[in-house]
Image (cartoon, coloured by chain):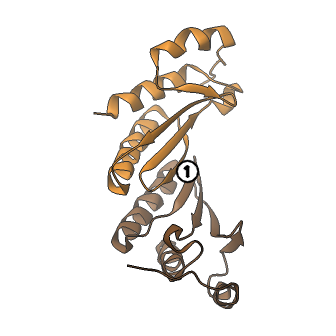
Chain colours: A orange, B brown
Amino acid sequence: MAVDRLSDDDIKARLPGLPEWSLRDGVLYRAFRFSDFSEAFGFMARVALEAERLDHHPEWQNVYNQVQISLTTHDAGGISDRDFELAQRIDALLP
Amino acid sequence: MAVDRLSDDDIKARLPGLPEWSLRDGVLYRAFRFSDFSEAFGFMARVALEAERLDHHPEWQNVYNQVQISLTTHDAGGISDRDFELAQRIDALLP
């Protein structure tokens, strides 16, 4: 399924809807901090299920209680609707 | 529990026992490639359980079917026995 890259104006218009996310090196980025590894990885497992359901996957890294997620759509050459959709679903997982 | 940093000589002596791992910027590093995200994250879940069991956690990143793991022991200021132990357990998870 082809996905369109969002324009810079589109992205700026939609970013306020995700106040914890920022544009960083052309990707949608958010850092998370949990109480420990168990909580961080539990969150990652839930993100993984959402990603698989959407067939859209994050670039992410984890060190102990910290998780950093970068969202971009390689097929679109930039940020697309799917990145905003996944970001919203990720946020919805948080308490 | 205090953990000693291994000397450079110790590390060099033990690296041949982990032929897929290399020293990279002072950490024990290995990259993995799987068939898809599901397989990659399934592997990560198993690594997470080993890490929790050892109470020693990786620095790692994932993009779709690729996983990169860096092992170091912050409390020791370098690579310790625990990194080699976790690396061995990670390798043992692979087919």
- Report the residue at 67% width, 91% height from top: B13
Which one is nearer the viewer's eye here, A4 or A89?
A89
| Chain letter of disc 1 in the image | B
> What residue is drawn where x is 38% and y is 56%?
A37
Q: Residue at x 50, y 35 (%)?
A: A55
Place of residue A79 in the rendered image (x, y in percent of width and height, measured from the top left):
63, 24
Q: Residue at label 1?
A: B36
Up/down of B38 relative to B95, above or below: above
Q: Residue A71 location, x and y as percent?
A: 57, 33
Q: In this view, does A50 lie to the left or right of A28?
A: left
Q: What element carries label 1?
A: loop
Residue A7 seen in this snapshot = no
Q: Residue furthest left?
A: A95
Q: Note whether residue A63 is visible.
A: yes
Number of disc labels: 1
| Closer to the camera in the image, A47 or A39 | A39
**Rendered residue at 55%/57% (across/down):** B60
Residue type, numbered disc 1: Asp
Instruction: Indicate left or right for A30 with A78 as reference.
Output: left
Q: Is residue A25 above or below residue B86?
A: above
A28 relative to A81, above or below? below
Closer-to-camera residue (A4/A63): A63
Q: Quadrant of the N terminus of chain B?
A: bottom left
* Residue B19, image quadrant: bottom right
Instruction: Between residue B72 and residue B40, name the one nearer to us.
Output: B72
Tell me residue A58's x, y (percent): 54, 39
Tell me where residue A74 appears, x and y as whole percent.
Answer: 67, 33
Label 1 packing within 10 angstroms: few (<14), some (14-19), many (20+): few
